[in-house]
Image (cartoon, grey):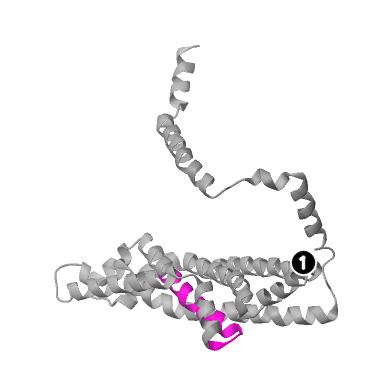
Amino acid sequence: MSLNAATRAAALRDPHAARRLAACAAALVIAWPMLALSEFKPWALFTGGNLAVIGGFLAGFFPPDGSPAFLALLLKATLETLAMATAGTALALLIGAPLGFVTTRALSISRIGPGPGRVQAGIVRQAARWLLMVLRAIPEIVWALLFVRALGLGPAAGVLALAITYGGMLGKVYAEILESADTRPARTLLECGSGRLAALCYGLLPNTAQELASYTVYRWECAVRASVVMGFVGAGGLGQLMDQSMKMLNGGEASSILLVFLALVLLADLLSSALRRLLA
């Protein structure tokens, strides 16, 4: 091997290869007991008896049910699910956006330098963080069970459950997105005497609007899926219809409902792309 070839080979060699190999080995050592505790045995799916059961179950999904009576029920359930997800996300936005605004350190006037109200501002910011943690710590399905007991069957329980849990999620992520952007324009505005709202609108939002909109639409997509899950506990919508179809072992109806799920996810992707182009 020539000197130039040896030099090129040395330059292409990863100087951190040993460190990365050690990290991968440590990850495997940690992950293996976790897989064992979770009883992760994917090969059990491919045994003869299980394959026959899975094949028979999937065969019942074809063809999808297209009867007028069922399509009318499906349309009503789809509208309920969309209404539940949209109303829940809108209420979550009303909860999460102000809390995210309060917890964003880049918009804290008291952090510019010594002055009155520094301790009080820190207490308020920490209290808002704890509130966001409490809101997102309890799964929406638990809130749905609680509100179904209080309000009875129907989408209202799902709307409130989504508003509470997703409000905590939106507030947490909004604050992180705002703090991960270039905060120098907002800091400059605050140091020049601007208010926090003006610093947010003119210092942070221009660089984060696309990401904030994209995440909000993604959270709406998650709300659609969560609305379906909450339907299994009585919150109405596609989930309740799916629960009835599965209990009646009607695979055709379940297949039609799954096709609607796919269409709703595609709608969310198209909406997210349109918003990003609009805000570009």
Q: Residue at x 82, y 59 (%)?
A: 59
Q: Pick whichever, 63 or 191, lies toward us.
A: 63
Q: Residue at x 79, y 54 (%)?
A: 55
Q: Pick whichever, 30 or 276, lies toward us.
A: 30
Q: Is residue 227 magenta?
A: no
Tell me if 258 is positioned left or right of 166 in this view.
right
Residue extent of the magenta highlight: 151-171
* Residue 38 versus residue 167 in the image, above or below: above
Look at the image and tell me whether residue 278 can be seen: no
Element assignment for label 1: helix
Look at the image and tell me whether residue 19 can be seen: yes
Q: Quadrant of residue 73?
A: bottom right
Q: Residue at x 61, y 69 (%)?
A: 225
Q: Residue furthest top?
A: 1
* Number of numbered tags placed on the structure image: 1
Q: Pick whichever, 89 or 28, lies toward us.
A: 28
Query: Horizontal and vertical percent for residue 171?
Result: 41, 71
* Residue 20 versus residue 250 in the image, above or below: above
Q: Quadrant of residue 234?
A: bottom right
Q: Quadrant of residue 75?
A: bottom right
Give the residue pinned by disc 1: 255
Q: Residue at x 54, y 88 (%)?
A: 151
Secondary structure of the magenta portion, mostly?
helix
The type of residue carrying mark 1 is: Ser
Tell me if 182 is positioned left or right of 278 in this view.
left
Query: Horizontal and vertical percent for residue 94?
Result: 44, 80
- Check disc 1: other Cα within 10 Å, few if <14, some if 14-19, many if 20+: many
Q: Residue furthest front?
A: 49
Tell me if 75 is positioned left or right of 14 in this view.
right
Query: Horizontal and vertical percent for residue 101?
Result: 36, 74
